[in-house]
Image: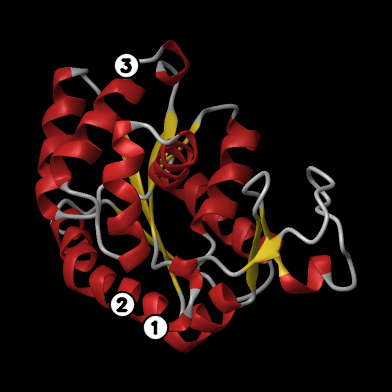
């Protein structure tokens, strides 16, 4: 199964993508994770992307298209994949369509997870990252803890720049301006499955699973 997962920052698409990928045994391709790793590794791509990401702006199309093209040609994508965070512009969507056509891939489902902007700002503001390993946690999961549950680093939790409210608001504005037209693009192809993103992780995942069963 090939899936494209949409949703504003903080809607939970990354969490849902990991659950679906595990259930279907297909790779979860997160452009955000790829970029953050590049920033951590201080690669040329990471250096270019860090300043852009800290502002909450989109990384240029040509960089993102190149990343996806390389990733989809890896052997583990032969039986399916989940794209999380791509495409984010109509230009990226048309470039992806061309790439998929060249790879003779036609059966792609688009899932759009929705939630209110104020709820998203609240969710993202409750995130904390570990300075040592980069793992992201929800505040309630690390309340009272002085060590990272993932790497055991002490006093390493912090609020990332791109999770601060003013940056989140800008990220949401960027999403509305640049990414929602992509949904219109896919809606014209009658390929968008909309999912209510409010509720527990399991509740949302159940909605996604039910919709995919109906679609296929």
Q: Residue 94: horizontal and vertical position, in percent?
A: 10, 42
Q: Position of residue 148 (x, y in %)?
A: 80, 53
Name the colouring of the figure: secondary structure
Q: Say which residue appears at 79% left-offset and 61% top-offset.
A: 155
Q: Is residue 133 left or right of residue 196?
A: right
Residue sitting at x 21%, y 18%? 103
| Contact check, label 2 and label 1, Cβ < 8 Å | yes
Relative to residue 94, is residue 193 drawn left or right? right
Spatial CA span between label 2 and label 1: 6 Å
Tell me which label, 3 or 1, sits earlier in the chain: 3
Q: Which mark is residue 26?
A: none
The correct choice, above or below, for 103 with respect to 172 in the image is above
Q: Which circle marks residue 170 in the picture?
A: 2
Alpha carbon separation for disc pair 3 and 1: 37 Å
**Nearest the camera: 41 or 34?**
41
Q: CA distance from mark 2 to mark 3?
A: 33 Å
Residue identifier under label 3 = 73
Task: Point out the residue furthest to the top here.
Answer: 75
Q: Is residue 1 visible?
A: no
Quarter-of-image position of residue 105: top left
* Residue on which the image places disc 1: 166
- Above or below: residue 66 compared with residue 198: above
Toward the bottom, the furthest residue is: 118
């Amino acid at each position: 199964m090939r899936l494209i997962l949409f949703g504003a920052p903080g809607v939970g698409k990354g969490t849902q993508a990991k659950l679906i990928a595990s259930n279907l045994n297909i790779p979860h391709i997160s452009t955000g994770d790829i970029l953050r790793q590049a920033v951590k590794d201080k690669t040329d791509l990471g250096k270019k992307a860090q300043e852009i990401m800290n502002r909450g702006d989109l990384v240029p199309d040509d960089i993102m298209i190149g990343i996806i093209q390389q990733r989809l040609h890896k052997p583990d994508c032969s039986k399916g994949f989940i794209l999380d965070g791509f495409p984010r512009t109509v230009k990226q969507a048309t470039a992806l369509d061309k790439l998929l056509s060249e790879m003779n891939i036609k059966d792609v489902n688009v899932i759009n997870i929705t939630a209110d902007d104020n709820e998203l700002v609240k969710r993202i503001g409750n995130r904390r990252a570990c300075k040592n390993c980069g793992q992201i946690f929800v505040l309630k999961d690390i309340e009272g803890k002085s060590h990272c549950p993932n790497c055991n680093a002490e006093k390493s939790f912090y609020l990332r720049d791109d999770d601060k409210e003013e940056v989140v608001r800008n990220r949401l504005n960027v999403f509305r301006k640049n990414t929602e037209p992509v949904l219109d693009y896919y809606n014209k192809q009658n390929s968008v499955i909309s999912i209510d993103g409010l509720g527990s992780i399991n509740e949302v995942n159940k909605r996604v699973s039910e919709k995919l069963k109906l679609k296929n």
